[in-house]
Image (cartoon, grey):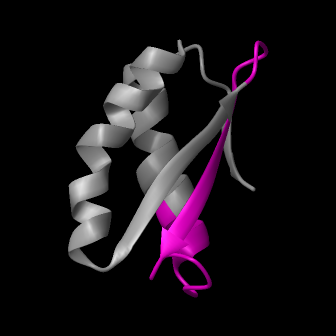
Amino acid sequence: MKEKVESVLNKIKPKLQADGGDVELIEVTSDGVVKVKLTGACRGCPMSEMTLKMGIEWAIKHEVPEVKEVIAV
């Protein structure tokens, strides 16, 4: 499952990097929780929660249905 999540994140990263941000995979737990770290311009951005839930989490769940939740750490 970790490889699938990394693949999705690699598709998302160019969009985040174009705005000066990035996302780093920290952990994929056995119960389907993905932990990521938002970096660059994404860190502290007022829209980061929306980016996380409506962008990153949606994309990961769409391609890796066994993922239950994506959280920022």
Residues in magenta, as a range: 29-51
Task: Examine the rendered structure and indicate whether residue 35 appears above or below residue 3.
Answer: below
Q: Is 18 positioned to the left or the right of 62 in the image?
A: left
Front-most of residues 44 and 66? 44
Q: Quadrant of the C terminus?
A: bottom right
| Snapshot quadrant of residue 21 | bottom left
Magenta highlight on residue 39: yes
Task: Examine the rendered structure and indicate whether residue 40 appears above or below residue 1.
Answer: below
Residue at 45%, 33% in the rendered image: 60
| Snapshot quadrant of residue 52 | bottom right
Residue 18, position as x, y percentages in the image: 20, 73
Magenta highlight on residue 4: no
Q: Is 49 positioned to the left or the right of 72 in the image?
A: left
Q: Is residue 64 visible?
A: no
Residue 47, position as x, y percentages in the image: 52, 80
Q: How many marks?
A: 0
Q: Is residue 62 visible?
A: yes
Residue 8, position as x, y percentages in the image: 34, 33
Q: Is 12 positioned to the left or the right of 31 in the image?
A: left
Residue 13, position as x, y percentages in the image: 30, 53
| Snapshot quadrant of residue 3 | top left
Residue at 53%, 12% in the rendered image: 1
Residue at 30%, 49% in the rendered image: 12
Residue at 32%, 79% in the rendered image: 20
Q: Is 35 positioned to the left or the right of 51 in the image?
A: right
Task: Examine the rendered structure and indicate whether residue 9 appears above or below residue 56.
Answer: above
